[in-house]
Amino acid sequence: MTTRTMTPATLNPQRVDPSTVVARTTPRSSLQETWVQILAMAWRALKKMRRKPEQFFDVLIQPLLFTAMFAFIFGGAISGSVSNYLPVLIPGILAQTALTVCMATGVQLREDMDKGVFDRFKSLPIARIAPLAGPMIADLIRYGIASVLTLATGLFIGYRPGGGVLGCVAGVALTMIAGWSLAWIFTWLGTMARSAQSVQGISMMIMFPLTFLSNAFVPAETLPGWLEAFVKVNPVSHVVSAVRDLLNDGAVTVEVGWAVIGCVIVVLIFAPLAVRSYSRKM
């Protein structure tokens, strides 16, 4: 005598949920397929940027405004002159600009989710990380534009980086890497928050302390002891110090290594959190 296990498919094949069949028979995307899917989502984000040029307002106007404003307002008070302050200021503005630009990643993600765009993605046999990482790859263009404009503005008003061309290229590259890694934090917030407005509000609460309570605009040694201790452990301070070493001296110092390690740690922590939160929303 044999027994047969009855399943919903054997009891009534017409009542089987098609999504369960697809989930069982569709294999996981390979690494190559995942990369192709990420690039496809990046191309979609680029086309979206082309149709909405207002997304470039922050990367076009903010570097020019902040660099000139901080240089001429605080240059004489902090360093005695604008020219002496620029080696301190330009790396700090680079870090602040990258942090501000990557903050928009979470806001735009939440807007797409509210519009139902990601409801279409869940019907596609693609890796869950592709809709998140694709737009972030496209945002590298925005980080690059903001960094180059900041550096160009500094050169126009008198900044002369001692690191030369290679130091400038390395500093801009590190800024883009830092912005891309920090964008995973705001991506995770975008999947957790209930609206784009809440994402923007929370992101501003994160951005201002990280930026202004760092060594981006003033030397840490000039701050009170308790504040100096926080500034030294602030990850933005390590990025700023690393960019300063690259731009001003062209040197790959310990700060550069700490900045890269910090970026890797941020991605390893917040990328899985973002993918997991996004999968639960699906």
Image (spheres, rainbow, N blue to C red):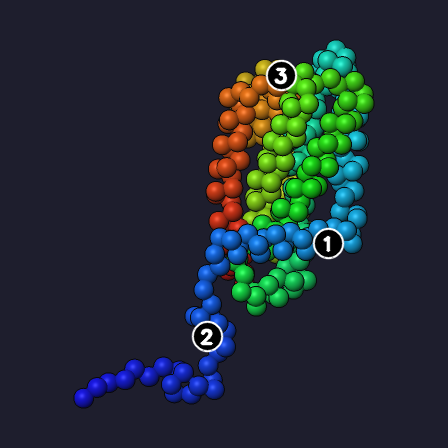
- Residue assigned mark 3: 249
**SS at mark 2?**
helix
Q: Is residue 71 left or right of residue 134?
A: right
Decide: marks 3, 2 in contact (CB < 8 A)? no
- Residue 47 marker: 1
Precedes in sequence: disc 2 or disc 1 = 2
Q: Residue at x 73, y 27 (%)?
A: 151
**SS at mark 3?**
helix
In the image, residue 272 sits, relative to residue 208, either above or below, namely below
Precedes in sequence: disc 3 or disc 2 = 2
Task: Locate the C terminus by quadrant.
Answer: bottom right
The residues bearing labels 2 and 1 have C-alpha atoms spaced at a distance of 34 Å
- Residue assigned mark 2: 21
- Residue 253, position as x, y percentages in the image: 53, 20
- Residue 256, position as x, y percentages in the image: 54, 25
Q: Is residue 37 left or right of residue 27?
A: right
Q: Residues within 10 Å of mark 2 (few under 14, many from 20)?
A: few
- Residue 217, position as x, y percentages in the image: 67, 23
In the image, residue 270 sits, relative to residue 276, either above or below, namely above
User: Of all residues shown, which one is farthest toward the top?
Assistant: 80
Q: Amino acid at mark 2?
A: Val
User: On the image, which quarter does residue 166 sit in?
Assistant: top right
Q: Is residue 232 visible?
A: no
